[in-house]
Image (cartoon, grey):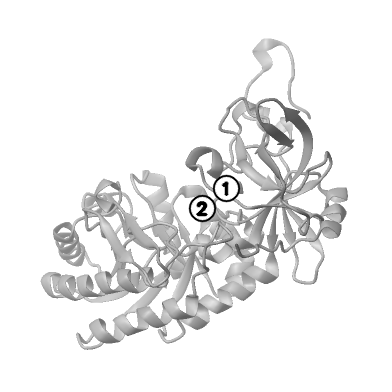
Amino acid sequence: MSEKIPFLTLAKAQEIVQDVPTPFHIYDEKGIRENVRRINKAFAWNKGFKEYFAVKALPNPTILRILAEEGCGVDCSSLTELMLSDAVGFGGDQIMFSSNMTPVEDMQLAYKMGAYINLDDATMVDFLERVAGVPETVFCRYNPGGTFTLGESEEGFQVMDNPGEAKYGMTEAQMIESFRRLAQKGAKHFGIHAFLASNTISNVYYPELAGILFTLAVRVAKAANVHISCINLSGGVGIPYRPDQPENDIAAIGEGVKEQFEKILVPAGMGDVKIFSEMGRFTTGPYGALITTAIHEKHIYKEYIGVDACAANLMRPAIYGAYHHITVLGKQYAACDHKYDVVGGLCENSDKFAIDRMLPKIDIGDILYIHDTGAHGFSMGYNYNGKLRSAEVLLCADGTHQLIRRAETPHDYFATLDMTPYGKKLSED
């Protein structure tokens, strides 16, 4: 089994805890910047390439500013994500708006900001014209239906998903008709978007997807008599949550997409197509961690370690059974000879960060580092049981740390309630 190495030392964690009590999510600025540069280098062969970071993965303005400085755009799917991106300084074609079942005010703001609008369904053509207007460049999201199977990749992993069961996207026939109608309404340039599989650990997923979309683009451009200017490969490039999983090689992935580009689009006279991506998980996932303290132990039919974090801080293990590696800071080289369930304090038996996990002996007060929470970690948090969302901290490139989101307080929790009729004030002033 290979080793997963924390980007945070015990000494640094103890220093931060003096300012920011656990639990908190922490992000590695240096790691994020270096990774974005690897992505941009891998696709530098395409002059129009841009990574549109999925805001839903990590909606923090400090992180978004870092990504903007490294040349990224943002992918938004809601009104508030658009507002957050606008506040940070994104605008126009720096924003991809990919939503479904879209409310009127969301679509109107996306149009007003000049964002690329990615239509999820053929019925959205009339909706877009009615509530906002038809911009010169419009995307449509493709769903091929059926089951997507990559087969055995070079790493030995099978990649499979079921687009036919997904609520997203439109058929090829619907896309052709939508492009025709959009052209009649004034659109001049068109983009294609698709997402066929999630968290793939395979260097061949993106090239395979690119081949499907490039071939589709050639057919659609001819059938609809339109100019395809952009193809968005979306997300799906995964990260190794488990120590024994291989890492994706972004350079090899970029080269694989280039080969498909030169094989399919260039001969079709479509060598000007811009390639976009939305690799939220791959971009920031490994560069975030949930830091939590062991506060209880329990010995019944199993051995339990209770921590001050819970599924409200990181819900992936509870709802997906997802694996997140755990390091006991300061005990990285101790024998993993104790079997624990590492649990939070929610009134739900699924509130477990690890089940039957072999770890070093954990003592009360030990600081646990839960790996790979830099995407879909904090952002999926919630307030069940009245639990409060944690703080977010940036480990700056110079080694200092910065609080980039304070922890919620009871005042925040009660702020949307009117407690006046009950005669008692529950929130703070």
Determine if residue 416 is in view.
Answer: yes
Of residues 137 and 25, the one drawn nearer to the viewer in this rendering: 25
Determine if residue 272 is in view.
Answer: no
Mark-to-mark CA distance, 1 and 2: 7 Å
Residue 24, position in %: x, y? 72, 47
Seen from this angle, which residue lies furthest left?
A: 223
Left or right, 351 with respect to 99, comes to right
Q: Are marks 1 and 2 in contact (CB under 8 Å)?
A: yes
Pointer 1: residues within 10 angstroms few (<14), some, or many (20+)? some
Tell me the amino acid under the disc marked 2. Answer: Lys
In the rendering, which numbered label is found on residue 56? 2
**Pointer 1 residue:** 379
Residue 61, position in %: x, y? 63, 58
Of residues 31 and 76, the one drawn nearer to the viewer in this rendering: 31
Q: Quadrant of the N terminus?
A: bottom right
Residue 219, position in %: x, y? 15, 73
Decide: is 325 above or below 301: below
